[in-house]
Image: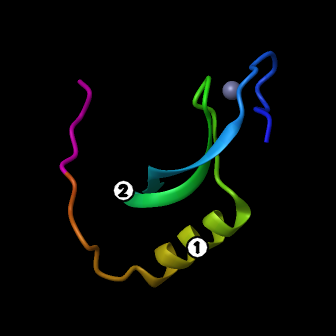
Amino acid sequence: MKCSIQGCPGQYETKLIVHTVKSGADILVFENVPAEVCNVCSDMLLPPQTVEHLEALMTRRTKPQRFAPLYEYI
Ligand SMILES: [Zn+2]
């Protein structure tokens, strides 16, 4: 699929990404999330089925598999 960013000649490719979601004071990190990523400008789209699956994971709030270090930029 062609990139939706105006003037970008790239194509979206399915890649597994790390996706973070802010949920109130929490930051949730999801690894190996299937997304469409442009091979030129890195624009990223989450397919509807990926969004649904993420929402299901967030609703269930099961115990995380791992914990990630979190750093403030400043
Ligand atoms: Zn692009």
Kind of residue sitting beneath label 2 = Ala
Kind of residue sitting beneath label 1 = His
Image check: 61 left or right of 69? right
Q: Please give the name of the residue rendered at 48% of the width and 76% of the height, measured from the top-left corner.
A: 57
Secondary structure of the residue carrying tag 1 is helix
Image check: 67 left or right of 12? left
Dividing the picture into quarters, in which one does residue 28 lie? Answer: bottom left
Kindly indicate whether the residue at mark 2 contacts the one at mark 1 (C-beta within 8 angstroms).
Answer: no
| Residue 72 in the image: above or below residue 58 | above
State how far apart marks 1 and 2 are (Cα).
22 Å
Image check: 17 left or right of 27? right
Q: How many other residues sit within 10 Å of disc 2, few (<14), some (14-19) or many (≥20)?
A: few
Dividing the picture into quarters, in which one does residue 63 lie? Answer: bottom left
| Residue 73 in the image: above or below residue 37 | above
| Residue 55 in the image: above or below residue 40 | below
Image quarter where the N terminus lies is top right
Q: Which residue is mark 1?
A: 53
Judging depth in this view, the residue of 39 and 5 nearest the camera is 39
Specify the label residue 25 is tagged with.
2
Assess whether residue 47 is covered by the magenta stretch. Answer: no
> Where are the magenta residues, as a range?
69-74
Q: Position of residue 45 (x, y in %)?
A: 66, 46
Q: How many other residues sit within 10 Å of disc 1, few (<14), some (14-19) or many (≥20)?
A: few
